[in-house]
Amino acid sequence: MKPRKDVRILNLMIHKSGSGSLSSRLCIPMSWAKHMGLNIENKQVEVSFNYELKEIKIKKLQKQEL
């Protein structure tokens, strides 16, 4: 039986463009993506940020939501 919760410490990658603007990226473990049913053909997710809790949630989109 898989654990109900898996916690990882990840690093936010920050890139600076040639014009000086910044962008960020966060990579999740592939095992999490596979467990969510994400793959090359089905890779869209909904990401929400709760400003009060300072919490990010990632949810797989269903086919009808696309």
Image (spheres, rainbow, N blue to C red):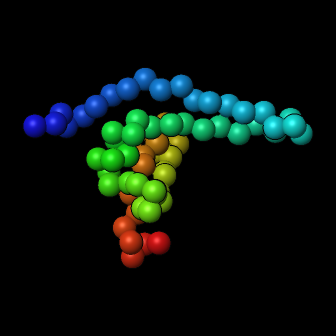
Q: Position of residue 50 (x, y in %)?
A: 48, 45
Q: Is residue 48 above or below residue 21?
A: below
Q: Position of residue 45 (x, y in %)?
A: 46, 56
Q: Is residue 38 above or below residue 5?
A: below
Tell me, yes or no, if residue 53 can be seen here: no
Q: Position of residue 24 (x, y in %)?
A: 65, 37
User: At x 89% / y 39%, what residue is drawn?
Assistant: 19
Q: Is residue 19 above or below residue 13?
A: below
In depth, the one of 39 and 12 nearer the eye is 39
User: At x 33% / y 28%, what residue is drawn?
Assistant: 7
The residue lying furthest to the left in this view is 1
User: At x 46% / y 42%, what residue is drawn?
Assistant: 56
Left or right? Give the position of 6 relative to 47.
Answer: left
Left or right? Give the position of 23 relative to 44.
Answer: right
The residue lying furthest to the front in this view is 40
Instruction: Find residue 22 and report its image quarter.
Output: top right
Q: Position of residue 49 (x, y in %)?
A: 50, 46
Instruction: Find residue 23 and report its image quarter.
Output: top right
Instruction: Find residue 30 and report its image quarter.
Output: top left
Counting labels gives 0
In the picture, the quarter occupied by the N terminus is top left
Tell me, yes or no, if residue 57 can be seen here: yes
The residue lying furthest to the bottom in this view is 64
